[in-house]
Amino acid sequence: MEHWEETDISEGEIYYNHYDPDERLDIEDIRALELTDKAGNEINIYDTNGYRIPRRQPIYRSDTQGCGLLADLSKVHKLFTDDDGEDIDDHLRINVYPQAFTRQYGHFQANDVPIGFHPIITAINRQTARFADSAPVVRGVACQGYNNVQHCLTEKAGSLEIVEGKMTAAFGGANVKEASNKLKQAKLVESISRCRPHGRIAEKLSVQSLARAFRVEPVFVVDVQQLKRRYQCGGYVRFLVTYQSKLTLCVAA
């Protein structure tokens, strides 16, 4: 990234300093509000529905070489907490998976959806659920973030070729005795003779059209039985699924 560029914010709207209607205060003069705090973090603003309004966007050089993006694992927790850093869910659990020995950058999984979805879920339940507090229609149950490059390099979960130890298995199996193991050994040797695992990965990475986005995938559960009677029809369930798909695309972007 080369620099940040401030976005145009309409001055005729009402903005708030918090997404929660019970805690937020009006921002009297949006022009007088600082863009960032002392740590360089953007000072968030929200609209009437509790959605965060971006106040700046990253600008990249046109000649920047494409690469696989990773999450800053030291900041992942902020995706699931409020502005004060407090957990919304006492049972929040986040698992992180550093990549390439960086210790700080990689993938993550959580047993909740990002906090930005909470106002949306609350609004849907308030409108459609018979008992929104005790038996919601929509619940956010999980989320994962990973680089799409790795997804494209693996044919199935856990099958990244360069970590399977094929070279070691080929060398170590030279003295196998059983016929079935000899056949497996021959196929393995033939495979690495054509191209080494790292060579195959390098060939896949050389494709310019390879998707390199960092994907964030929230998971929702829709309990149709908790819908108000007038909403218990196939058309409305289809609306819920479509609505959530759009939200997932927004987060992935």
Image (spheres, grey):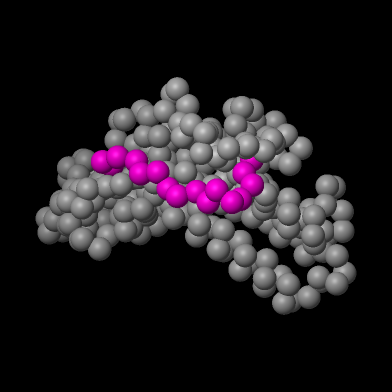
Q: Measured from the top left, where is residue 111 in percent x and y? A: 61, 42
Instruction: Examine the rendering and report whether any part of residue 178 can be seen.
Output: no
Residue in view at x 51 percent, y 39 percent: 31
Residue 151: quarter of image: bottom left
Residue 231: quarter of image: bottom right
Task: Locate the N terminus and report the quarter of the image it occupies.
Answer: top left
Q: Measured from the top left, where is residue 35 in percent x and y? A: 46, 34
Residue in view at x 35 percent, y 44 percent: 5
Task: Tell whether position 2 is magenta.
Answer: yes
Residue 171: quarter of image: top left
Left or right: 225 in relation to 42: right
Left or right: 138 in relation to 191: right
Nearer to the camera, 100 or 181: 100
- Name the residue at the left extreme: 193
| Marker count (numbered) | 0
Left or right: 189 in relation to 96: left
Residue in view at x 17 percent, y 57 percent: 206
Nearer to the camera, 170 or 192: 192
Q: Measured from the top left, where is residue 101 in percent x and y? A: 30, 30
Q: Measured from the top left, where is residue 10 in percent x and y? A: 53, 51
Nearer to the camera, 42 or 9: 9
Residue in view at x 71 percent, y 60 percent: 222
In magenta, the rendered stretch is 1-16
Instruction: Examine the rendering and report whether any part of residue 52 can be seen.
Output: yes
Left or right: 180 in relation to 190: right
* Secondary structure character of the magenta stretch overall: loop
Task: Locate the C terminus and report the quarter of the image it occupies.
Answer: bottom left
Above or below, 202 against 169 in this view is: below
Task: Tell whether position 36 is magenta.
Answer: no
